[in-house]
Amino acid sequence: METFLEKLKRVISSERIWQNEPMKQHTTFRVGGPADYYVRPSIEEIQSIITLAKRENMPYTIIGNGSNLLVKDGGIRGLVIELGLEAGMVHLKEGNNHMITAEAGVRLSALAKVAANNSLTGLEFAAGIPGTVGGAVFMNAGAYGGEIKDVIVNATVLDEDGIVRCFSKEDLDLSYRHSAISENGGIVLSASFVLQEGNPDEILAKMADFSARRKEKQPLEFPSAGSTFKRPEGYFAGKLIQDAGLAGYRIGDAQVSEKHCGFVINRGNATATEILQLISDVQEKVQKEFGVKLETEVRILGEDA
């Protein structure tokens, strides 16, 4: 009887299939146990891989470049599909509206550079966001007053029924760290954005300013998943955590950053278990001190060890 691996190799080349792949190698947190199967397909291969997984009752998980993930120490059962470098083309269409279309695996920073190099403004806020286009649409990523919803026109999505559909901006239902995709399922394959003509020097200066501010205020020297908590309405998560006296709070190598308390960092050899316990402790203390419930922004996947 043909194994799942053998069937998978008929859909994607064996060079892009890994077994028992440590997820800490694929997350910016640098933690996480192994995935049973790990593949890096092109956009054209995704539909066939999903069809195979469903037919074989193989659970599957979609990730980008792992910048907003915390994978537990027991790893991920089933198939992990990375929409990364193999799914990363950018297309420009000039006209009355300057449209730029990017496949799911394109890094936001790379997309912002393409826009800047073509004197297009509107994506400067995305220059320092470490995620991919697919992940950015999934969570309506944003920074420095800009969000994906401000510039997106539509997205091509593989829906839960395996049908490729075009979702309009309205269909995507984008709001703070939310989309119809994150709520209802589906896989972003590509997205199109409308930008405006701009002065290239001003665009690059704005990107440089955002980059300098990010380096100054965020603990980029340590592995993390970016902002650990969503912004509670009427508050700032980092300030609440600082005011609760938790700056520098540490469990093993997991620590609340002293530079920016909204970040939980990995000082070297943190485990997911330590990070999760630290997150829980922070949530409990902030709730007790201020009556505010902190919700995680980071996406938590996998099983306990």
Image (cartoon, rainbow, N blue to C red):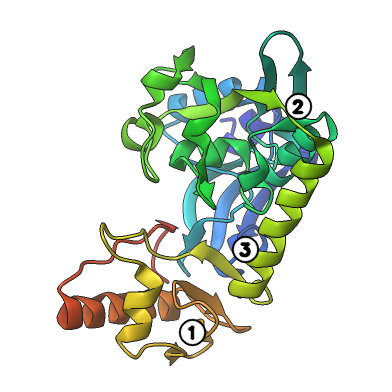
Task: Choose top left, top right, bottom left or bottom right for residue 135.
Answer: top right
Q: In this orientation, which residue lies closer to the viewer: 131 or 211?
A: 211
Question: Would you say residue 213 is visible in this rendering?
Answer: yes
Q: In this orientation, which residue lies closer to the viewer: 251 or 259?
A: 259
Task: Choose top left, top right, bottom left or bottom right for residue 213.
Answer: bottom right
**Which residue position is annotated with label 1?**
255
Q: Position of residue 216 (x, y in %)?
A: 65, 74
Q: In this orientation, which residue lies closer to the viewer: 213 or 175?
A: 213
Q: Secondary structure at mark 1?
A: strand
Q: Position of residue 138 (x, y in %)?
A: 47, 37
Give the residue type that dot 2 points to.
Answer: Val
Q: Earlier in the sequence, mark 1 or mark 2?
A: 2
Q: Position of residue 89 (x, y in %)?
A: 76, 28
What residue do we see at 21% from left, 66% from top?
293
For the residues labelled 3 and 1, say whether their Cβ atoms are less than 8 Å apart: no
Q: On the picture, is 209 further left or further right than 77? A: right
**Above/below status of 277 relative to 229:** below
Q: Secondary structure at mark 3?
A: loop
Q: Earlier in the sequence, mark 3 or mark 2?
A: 3
Q: In this orientation, which residue lies closer to the viewer: 33 or 28?
A: 28
- The circle on residue 28 is 3
Q: On the picture, is 179 further left or further right than 110? A: left
